Image (cartoon, grey):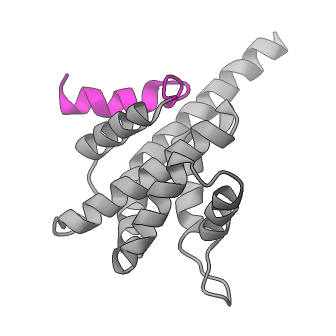
Amino acid sequence: MRTLDKFFALINENNPFLNVDTNIEVWRKVEEFMGTTRPVEHREFDQVIAATEKLILRAIISYLITFQPEKERNYSTIADLLRAGLEEDETGKTELDTLFDWVKENHEDAFCVNQYFTAKHIDKNFEDATICLLDRLTVLEILESDKLKQENMHEDKIITK
């Protein structure tokens, strides 16, 4: 499948993570995503940042498929969680840190916990990797939002008839 076809396949699914329910499938989805997207800012490629991006994305996708309902399993939710990982409170923690601290307390063996705290261990790259992921998601988030708007408009037409 061509890269452009893979890219559009990422956003054309009603739920891009519908058939993702094992750690191996999370790995595959992340590799597919990373292989078909590029940061908008086209930063110089850095293998450590790319590895950190993968850890963060695996943590978030794994969290979503394990702890969230299907309607929350989408690229917009991922972008929201990434943004929550950028703003620190007075204690130096982000909302994303707090979320994964809760998961660790209650489900310490969860795959998402391992991935998130490994990414956090590479601390100096965490923020850069988060920003790169947000850059990669920008196009998908916009396209996904447009698709949802179109679906809602279609549903409104059906309801009003």
Question: Seen from this angle, which residue lies furthest front?
Answer: 109
| x and y percentages locating residue 69 in the rendered image | 70, 35
Say which of 68 and 8 sits in front: 68
| x and y percentages locating residue 106 in the rendered image | 71, 54
Q: Is residue 36 above or below residue 88?
A: above
Say which of 138 and 131 sits in front: 131
| x and y percentages locating residue 20 in the rendered image | 48, 28
Q: Quadrant of the N terminus?
A: top left
On whether residue 42 falls in the magenta region, the answer is no
Q: Quadrant of the C terminus?
A: top right
Residue extent of the magenta highlight: 1-21
Q: Is residue 136 above or below residue 90?
A: above
Q: Residue at x 49, y 22 (%)?
A: 19
Q: Residue at x 54, y 32 (%)?
A: 147
Q: Is residue 40 visible?
A: no
Q: Is residue 13 left or right of residue 1?
A: right
Q: Residue at x 44, y 26 (%)?
A: 12
Q: Is residue 116 left or right of residue 139?
A: right
Q: Is residue 122 above or below residue 33?
A: below
Q: Is residue 57 left or right of residue 45?
A: right
| x and y percentages locating residue 16 in the rendered image | 49, 30
Question: Seen from this angle, which residue lies furthest bottom?
Answer: 90
Q: Is residue 105 visible?
A: yes
Q: Residue at x 41, y 64 (%)?
A: 118
